[in-house]
Image (spheres, grey):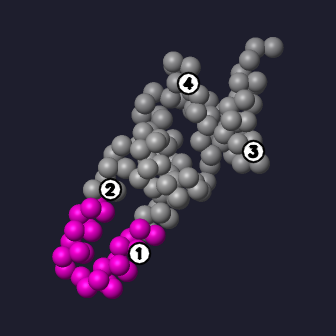
Amino acid sequence: MKQYKIFKHPSGAIEAVKQGWSWPAFLGGVLWAAAKRLWTIGFGVLSAFLVIGFIVANTASEQWGDAIINGLGATANLIFGVHGNGWREQNLLSRGFQLKQTVSAASPKEAVSLYLKNEAPV
């Protein structure tokens, strides 16, 4: 079982955010950021890579350029994996969501279901 923080928006929208490492963020990077509405992070990283790529392409040898780009890409993936879920939490809070509780579940869908079950009046 994994730990999920449950966030609820005043409009009724509910999001579950897994605690710890984020495989989707690690594997998806900028695309994951865009899908999760993390515009600043996504565009910032994309812009940085474009600028660095341009600089490396015009200054470094092909071998060193490839090594630099690959190293930066791997580092960015690790940073996304470590911090991705925390970034999501901060983004949800900034968009008006409120932290409601933390639940143990096998998936985000199950976490939301458990929250709704516990929230329902008896």
The crowd level at tag 2 (other Cα within 10 Å; few <14, some 14-19, many 20+) is some
Q: Name the residue under label 4.
A: 13
Q: Name the residue under label 3.
A: 106
Q: The residue tagged with tag 3: helix, strand or loop?
A: loop
* 73 magenta-colored: yes
The amino acid on which the numbered mark 4 sits, given as a three-letter code, is Ala
Q: The residue tagged with tag 1: helix, strand or loop?
A: helix
Q: What stretch is highlighted in magenta?
A: 48-74
Upstream in sequence: badge 2 or badge 3 = 2
Q: In the figure, residue 70 lies in which quadrant? A: bottom left
Mark 1–mark 3 Cα distance, whole angstroms, equals 33 Å
- Depth order, front residue of 60/88: 60
Q: Is residue 83 visible?
A: no
| Tag 2 near tag 4, CB within 8 Å | no
Upstream in sequence: badge 4 or badge 1 = 4
Residue 84, image x, y percentages = 50, 52
Look at discs 2 and 4 and give the one toward the viewer. Answer: 2
